[in-house]
Each structure stands twice: as structure tokens, then as C-alpha cells.
């Protein structure tokens, strides 16, 4: 995977002003990712008045076992919630 700084450098070199939106999440479906990309791009363009073609969205996925909330592994919290 290319480093974001490299991609950003290329866009700046070619004269692109752009908002870069980074989302960190657990596993998402392809449909969820597509909807996030479309919706975030549209919103960022409307707010910043920068064309949608200049907006970038990066989705970083992390396995659920890499997350914790309140000192507890997220997997255990999910299991407990599903069993209650």
C-alpha cells in the first residue's frame, strides 16, 4: 500500500487542493465502504467548496480483536451484549 504522504505529495505537485478524510473502523462490508466514500466525499465537497474529484477518503480497518473499550477487549463486550 502506498504511503498517504506520497499520495499527498503527488496531489500537491499536480496542484490539487484536497481534504483527506481518514476513517478507522472494525471490519466493514464493501457496501459500507462504498457508501462511506460517497457520503463523506459529497459532504466534504459541499462544506469546503472543493470539487469532489479532489477529495480523498482512506478507510483503515482493524480486526475486532485489536480493539478495547474501557479496559476490556471489544470481542468480549460484543459477546456479552449479544448474550444479554
Image: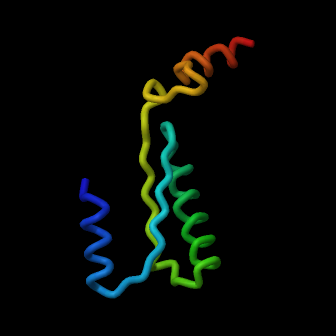
Q: Position of residue 11 (x, y in %)?
A: 32, 78
Structure colour scheme: rainbow
Q: Left or right: where does residue 25 sit relative to residue 60?
A: right
Dividing the picture into quadrants, the one containing residue 5 is bottom left
- Above or below: residue 72 compared with residue 21: above
Residue at x-position 56% and y-position 19%: 72
Foreground pick, 72 / 81? 72
Residue at left 52%, top 57%? 34
Q: Nearer the viewer, residue 34 or 18?
A: 18
Q: Where residue 79 appears, x then y in whole percent?
A: 61, 16
Q: Nearer the viewer, residue 39 or 9?
A: 9
Q: Residue at x 55, y 69 (%)?
A: 41
Residue 24, horizontal then vertical, whole percent: 48, 46
Expressed as whole percent of the image width and height from the top left, the position of residue 69 reads 58, 27
Residue occupying image coordinates x 24% and y 66%: 6
**Residue reaching furthest bottom?**
15
Q: Residue furthest right?
A: 84
In the rendered view of the protein, which quadrant contains the C terminus? top right
Count of numbered labels shown in the rendering = 0
Amino acid at each position: 500500500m502506498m504511503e498517504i504522504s506520497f499520495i499527498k505529495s503527488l496531489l500537491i505537485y499536480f496542484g490539487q487542493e484536497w481534504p483527506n478524510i481518514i476513517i478507522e473502523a472494525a471490519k466493514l462490508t464493501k457496501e459500507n465502504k462504498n457508501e462511506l466514500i460517497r457520503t463523506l466525499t459529497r459532504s466534504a465537497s459541499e462544506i469546503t467548496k472543493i470539487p469532489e474529484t479532489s477529495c480523498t477518503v482512506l478507510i483503515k480497518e482493524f480486526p475486532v480483536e485489536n480493539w478495547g473499550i474501557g479496559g476490556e477487549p471489544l470481542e468480549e463486550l460484543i459477546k456479552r451484549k449479544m448474550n444479554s
